[in-house]
Image (spheres, rainbow, N blue to C red):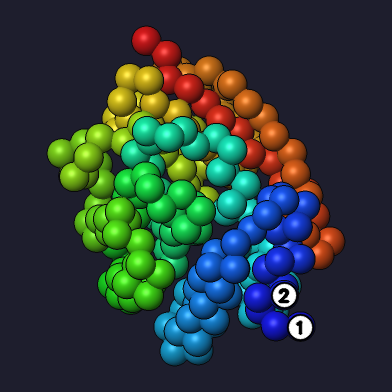
Amino acid sequence: MTLEELYREAFSSFLENISDDLVSKLARYHSELLRWNRRVSLTALSRDEEVAAKLFFDSAAGLPFLQEDDVLLDLGTGPGFPGLVLALFRPEIPVLLAEVRTKKVAFLKRMRHVLGLERVIIVDRRVEGVQDLPEVPTALTSKATGPPDEILSLGRKLLRPDGRVILYSGKTPGKAEGFRLVTRSQYDLPFGFGRRVLQVFAREG
């Protein structure tokens, strides 16, 4: 099975029609990720089906919760998950990829060029407040930065008053002050890699 066929199968239950161009870009991103991974540690995954399901499909699960006028911030994006994948599907919205590790920043810059994602901005410094960002985000996400409480705490500092946190975790935050849960979504990863939970929290006040 080619990578293009793999991605058509992986997303068949998620999107009715996926364009040839998007399939080609997903396959190219996948190929570059594993090629770079041989000399730079980007992911512990190596099997094509597992990479497609656990990195690409799982990242794309946040798509239904993005809005047309969003500015998305992905904290600790690593090699681009979920932010760069979301940018592939929604190239019209600004996506800020925050990553401080030099080799991963180099990979992100390479993929931004290869995939032609002109609205992707790479923030290669520690983000502690809105002063560290070129735009104030309306949506924040993170797959690997820390526990839910920490991500919501950062959301209070970084998001607009009407902003949202898209949380790739089923864990219930111990403290969600200033946020309310608006969506809790369960979905199955393709190729039998299990079930995941995604939660969306909206700012209050």
Q: Which mark is residue 67?
A: none
Lateral position of residue 137 relative to residue 55, left or right = left
Q: Secondary structure at mark 2?
A: helix
* Residue type, mark 1 in image: Met
Q: Is residue 49 above or below residue 56?
A: below
Instruction: Please tell me which residue lies in front, 74 or 60.
Output: 60
At a point 52% along the width and 42% down the height, the residue shown is: 147
> Residue extending furthest left?
131
Lateral position of residue 149 relative to residue 18, left or right = left
Instruction: Please tell me which residue lies in front, 46 or 114.
Output: 114
Q: Which mark is residue 5?
A: 2
- Examine the rendering and report whether any part of residue 37 can be seen: no
* Image quadrant containing the C terminus: top left
Q: Position of residue 170 (x, y in %)?
A: 67, 38
Q: Position of residue 41 (x, y in %)?
A: 46, 79
Q: Position of residue 140 (x, y in %)?
A: 41, 39
Q: Are marks 1 and 2 in contact (CB under 8 Å)?
A: yes
For marks 1 and 2, give the CA distance. 6 Å
> Residue extending furthest top?
205
At a point 37% along the width and 45% down the height, the residue shown is: 93
Instruction: Please tell me which residue lies in front, 167 or 87.
Output: 87
Badge 2: few (under 14), some or many (20 or more) residues near its Cα, within 10 Å? Answer: few
Residue for badge 1: 1
* Image quadrant containing the N terminus: bottom right
Residue 64: quadrant of the picture: top right
Q: Secondary structure at mark 1?
A: loop
* Residue type, mark 2 in image: Glu
Q: Position of residue 128 (x, y in %)?
A: 24, 42
At a point 69% along the width and 34% down the height, the residue shown is: 185
